[in-house]
Amino acid sequence: FMKYNLPKEYYELFWIFSHDFPDFLHEFLEAKSLQRLVHIGQNCGTEYTKFFDYKFEANRLWHSIWVALIIWNFTHDMKQTLSGLFHDISNSIFSHAWDYLLWDVQTQEAAEFYITDILQNDEKIMELLEKYHILIEEVNDYTKYPIADNHGPQLSSDRLEYTLDAGIYLWYKTFQEVKKMYDD
């Protein structure tokens, strides 16, 4: 997990969200389009302010992996899991703050219009989708899968993940407390 720039003490989150880490995820995580997410903060730029005292600074790659593992844990469905992994692949610096610049204040999904383009232009991702006989249309829109995304206030893997990981890095919950919440 070192290549994902995850501090060793946070490996435990992988195992809280899923008891196994499917091999196909490792293959897709080698894609440049996903690796660039290591440099994009999870908190829309607030990690650069003094508003919050973060225990550690999460990034979009960790968030995407954790979302994928939650989906895998409950479905063991490769397409849904990959859709969750790709859901933030088009995020730019300051993440959803970019949506405001694209005049999408209400849904904050404007950046998601680029997911298909990014997937199509990543040779590694396209090679692996072909290897696993998966069409891009089956993984480029995570809103197709209710476990991945639901309109609020319904629960989804995306919101569940960022709530639980924020419990650790912002609210100083222990891994055991987060696991108890997740298992419930």
Image (cartoon, rainbow, N blue to C red):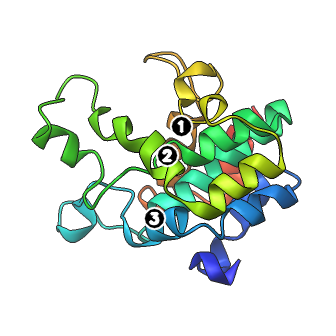
| SS of the residue under disc 3 | helix
Q: CA distance from mark 3 to mark 2?
A: 15 Å
* Residue at 20% from the left image edge and 47% from the top image edge: 97
- Residue type at mark 2? Tyr
Q: Position of residue 128 (x, y in %)?
A: 74, 55
Q: Position of residue 43 (x, y in %)?
A: 33, 55
Relative to the observer, which residue lies in front, 154 or 79? Answer: 79
Residue density around tag 1, few if under 14, some if 14–19, many if 20 or more, within 10 Å? many
- The residue under label 1 is 158
- Residue type at mark 3? Leu
* Residue at 56% from the left image edge and 30% from the top image edge: 142
- Residue type at mark 1? Asp
* Residue at 82% from the left image edge and 34% from the top image edge: 77
Q: Position of residue 24 (x, y in %)?
A: 82, 56
Which marked residue is nearer to the observer: mark 3 or mark 1?
A: 3
Q: Position of residue 154 (x, y in %)?
A: 52, 16
- The residue under label 3 is 37
Q: Earlier in the sequence, mark 3 or mark 2?
A: 3
Q: Image quadrant for the N terminus?
A: bottom right
Relative to the observer, which residue lies in front, 53 or 24? Answer: 24
Proximity of marks 2 and 1: CB atoms separated by less than 8 Å: yes
Q: CA distance from mark 2 to mark 1?
A: 6 Å
| SS of the residue under disc 2 | helix
- The residue under label 2 is 162
Which marked residue is nearer to the observer: mark 3 or mark 2?
A: 3
Residue density around tag 2, few if under 14, some if 14–19, many if 20 or more, within 10 Å? some
Residue density around tag 3, few if under 14, some if 14–19, many if 20 or more, within 10 Å? many
Mark yes or no: residue 180 visible: yes
